[in-house]
Amino acid sequence: MQIWIDVENASGTRYGDGPIRTATGWTSTRRLDRAGEFTFTMPASDPRLLCADGTALLQHKRVVRCWAADANGIREKGAGIIDTIEWTVDANGATMLTVSGSDLLRELANRTVGDLELFEAVTYTPRLEYQPVYSVITIPGNVNLNTDNFVFIRYARPFSKINFNLTTFNASETSTLQIQYYNAQDADMPTWEAVGGVVNTTNVGTGEHIIPFGQDGSIEFDPPTGWTLDDGYYTIRIFDQETEIDQFYVQSCTVTIVEPVTDGLQRIMALAPEGWSLDPAGMYATWDISEDEAKSVYMQFAGESVLSALVLLAEQTGEHFTLSAAARRVWWIGEAQESSGIRAVQSTDATLSGAFAPDATSQAIMLITDLSKASDSYELYTRAYAFGAGVGSGRLTMEKTTRSTSGYTLGALGAYLEADAAIAIYGRIDKREDYPDIAPVDTSAAQIVNAANTLYDRVLANLRRKCQLQYAYSLEVVPSKYEVWPGANNPRGLSRVGRELPRRQHLGPVAVGA
């Protein structure tokens, strides 16, 4: 087999007078959920290491790409970014270079996602009513906010912003407009209390000369912590019992609610370096296989790289990704393990090597020359105590989650999640987990629920992996043009002449061939 190595910039433009042909070997490994590695060795005396302009061909952060040619044709063996160049002298006195670094996925670490938010503001149409003399307010229509009327704005979920599109306006000044929420935490003595942090952009004027509903705008406020359902609705009431406010015409009225998103993967990749995309062979969204629907995520970042953001998304959803075979593409594998289409066969009969000699028609079979299997329980735990952002008693827990999963038990006040079957086998093994990146957008009940659900999902994804034994296979096989990618499995199992080995075991990152 012949190999040669091109040296390129990030755009693919090649450096030097031609490829490196003196490399004595190339090794590269793709990884799940992180960048892989490569390394190669070559003589330092190769004249192509010096470019025509006198500069060194091999420089840090340049891209190297290895090609191989054999009877089956030319194929790319791997590519990566130079991080380390090491000079060594061998036993014969010859100086050798060992070049190593990460594969191209590392380029995603060169861009930050900044303060990216994986949630969005969604608007809904609320119910408007007059009180205390009840009647429904039809929108579009006039609203009479006189001293005898309370205007109730009601929706089935908590909201923090009311948007008004007006076509006629109030012209009366007032300093006594009240905006209140319903608080029935004490069920025996419910009260109406003023909302805090009000920003009213329907106001015209300043100081004591304010005209509310004098223009299009919104009323935004801090989500009340004691907000309680009133006849099935979260309600804000607006009134002024001292000033007669002119009738104004409301063309439309909506409330804004912050919600999780289902396109978090695309939002992260939109910030990747130019030329990067998602591989169409993989998933284009985080996907719940059991429900056959996109998973929603509720996350916010603080300057992480694109690569780190993808890692956090994979941890949050319990899914996986790797570098695609196509240059500069992310292959989002999701929950499913892709079939490798290859059967691995082991035999102690050396004569079978000829029978399984690799060629174009035998690449669906690997002949194993060495096989080992290990099981490990070192990191196994059966109960996870978890906290999100916050300090002391103010830390986020899973208490307010709306999630439940068969086979898993949520502890009192959401303090922990445990795996029932694993408890029965291994007993209780505790693990404390902290996720300071998981926090509600605000202090409203709805956002605390969103954050608690996010915390639950992260804890569940980790507990599912860690509440069972971890198995690892190590294979050495007869070299051939195999393609087994990180995340692939072996659908027909590993077999040995006369005995079947365990089936459908996850192979993980496997380096095959020469």
Image: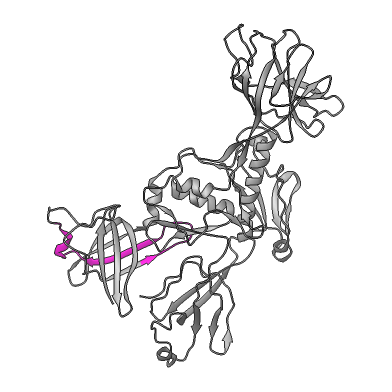
Q: Position of residue 416 (x, y in %)?
A: 69, 49
Residue 386: tell me if it is visible. Answer: no
> Which residue appears at 40% of the width and 50% of the height?
108
When asked about the image quadrant of residue 256, the answer is: top right
| Residue nearer the viewer, 281 or 9 | 281
Q: Height in image: 80 above or below 202?
A: below
| Residue nearer the viewer, 108 or 408 | 108
> Which residue appears at 14% of the width and 63% of the height?
47
When asked about the image quadrant of residue 89, the answer is: bottom left
Q: Answer left or right for 510 relative to 252.
A: left
| Residue nearer the viewer, 46 or 14 | 14
Q: Position of residue 361 (x, y in %)?
A: 42, 83
> Which residue appears at 49% of the width and 48% of the height?
266
Q: Answer left or right for 240 relative to 362.
A: right
Q: Height in image: 317 above or below 231?
A: below
Q: Position of residue 154 (x, y in %)?
A: 74, 29
Name the residue furthest right.
188
| Residue nearer the viewer, 458 or 426 | 458
Name the residue furthest bottom.
351
Placement of the N terminus among the 4 image quadrants? bottom left
Q: How is the image coloured?
A: one colour
In reply to whether residue 64 is colored magenta, the answer given is: no
Placement of the C terminus among the 4 image quadrants? bottom left
When asked about the image quadrant of residue 208, the answer is: top right
Residue 119: tell me if it is visible. Answer: yes
Q: How many discs appear?
A: 0
Q: Answer left or right for 108 relative to 447.
A: left
- Range of residues picked out in magenta: 28-51
